[in-house]
Image (cartoon, rainbow, N blue to C red):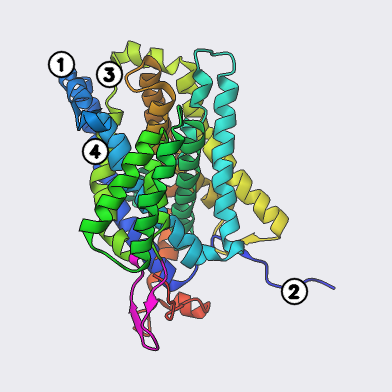
Amino acid sequence: MPDNRARPALFARGSWSEATRIAEVLREETVGGALLLLATVVALVWANSPVGDSYAALRDLTVGPESLHLNLSLGTWAADGLLAIFFFVVGLELKREFVAGDLRDPARAAVPILAALGGVVVPAVIYVLLNLGTGGGALSGWAIPTATDIAFALAVLAIISTHLPTGLRTFLLTLAVVDDLVAVTIIAVFYTSDLEFAFLVAALAPLALFGWAVQRRIRSWWLLLPLAAATWVLVHESGVHATVAGVLLGFTVPVIRSHAAGGPEAGPGLAEHFEHRLRPLSSAVAVPVFAFFAAGVAVGGLEGIKESLTDPIALGIIAGLVLGKPIGIVGAAWLTARFTNASLDDELSWYDVLGVSVLGGIGFTVSLLIGELAFGGGSVADDHVKVGVLCGSLVSALLAGVLMRARDRAYRRMYEAEQADVDADGIPDVYQQHGIADPSDETT
């Protein structure tokens, strides 16, 4: 007898509460992406101008207490300090997704997780294959093309004015968040040298106190900020990259709304409160400032660009981002569908998945960070890394623009259907039709 059970749908739009939250997150990240693009352009123009030496002098200016081994350059402060804010928000988002979001359902979580892993493994393999005989420590950059920059990707979406359906937007955001988790794990495991175990153990004390405080919904900045700073300093001193502290702190924050004893809900989870406060700081300040100090490479004119683009390091990064990302993401998603008997949402095709996966090849912020960790800031190899990341991200952005613009009419139709609210009850009709309005969702 034929199996009449409904086949699970890939890239479905999910619940109304989740769609609303995703839309809010993406709006903030889009603004941050525009500022990131502006900061990158300013850095490149300044670094290649007649006064380019002043850019390098500013980036290398050291500030901070030397007694605490924190007499760091402004570029290092941006990478180690400001990006810790970015990764704190990543930690909040990860916990939100897997504790209280749509991805608490293993069936829904499988596709973006496996797609993200495919988008990490394949670019890394391509980079390694192109650099097997390069020497000079080139293989240490294997993780550079594995990252996806969600802010940059959303800025590109805003520029090409595509009305991406909610299911694909959710997939892109979740893909990038899981990608960030993999990236911070790679940084902690593969780019930690001279580990000072005593400092790492000592970091557990302020981390535990921070977790104890937030679990009791304590929001006092005068308590939480010193504990977070102490955790960051001790992780930094341990030899583990300090951004790892941001993710660990984010994991301690409660997501579920608290309840008064025998009474109504006492308010949103503290994770939502922190996200609202810190996401604008992360997307509008931390990431653009890091990009400003990280992206300013003096390319040396056409000859310099030619030299960079003949380096297998840069070629491996470009090939990993432009080819490896879509091959890995689409391949993993297709295999998941094949072995779970899942099917695409009725209005979508694998062409749409390809467009999003090419957009995933925009690996900017974390790719530049890993490049600095792999080769050291200011080295020739690091300059070639920056050219490779910029070129690979640009090519991916252009290809994604072409692919997605071709489907914009269909996306616009889907988007308008998702916004229609004939009964004017505040919830679009399409979510109620499918029984996924979820108005009583108790999570943040």
Helix, strand or loop status at disc 3? loop
Magenta segment's dominant SS is loop
Q: Which residue is drawn at 50% across and 24% down?
A: 140
Nearer to us of marks 2 and 4 is 4
To which residue does mark 1 refer? 50
Helix, strand or loop status at disc 1? loop
Task: Count the labels in the image.
Answer: 4
> In the rendering, at what x and y percent does residue 81 appear?
29, 40
> In the rendering, at what x and y percent does residue 325 appear?
53, 38
**Mark 1 or 3, nearer chain start:** 1
> Was residue 321 drawn as part of the magenta stretch in this picture?
no
Q: Which residue is drawn at 52% across and 51% down?
A: 352
**Mark 4 or 3, nearer chain start:** 4
To which residue does mark 2 refer? 4
Q: Is residue 397 visible?
A: no
Q: In which quarter of the image is residue 18?
A: bottom left
* Cα–Cα span, label 4 and label 3: 18 Å
Q: Can residue 254 be seen in this view?
A: yes
**In the image, what residue type sits under mark 4?**
Val
Q: Is residue 212 above or below residue 406?
A: below
Circles 4 and 1, Cβ within 8 Å, touching? The answer is: no
To which residue does mark 3 refer? 298
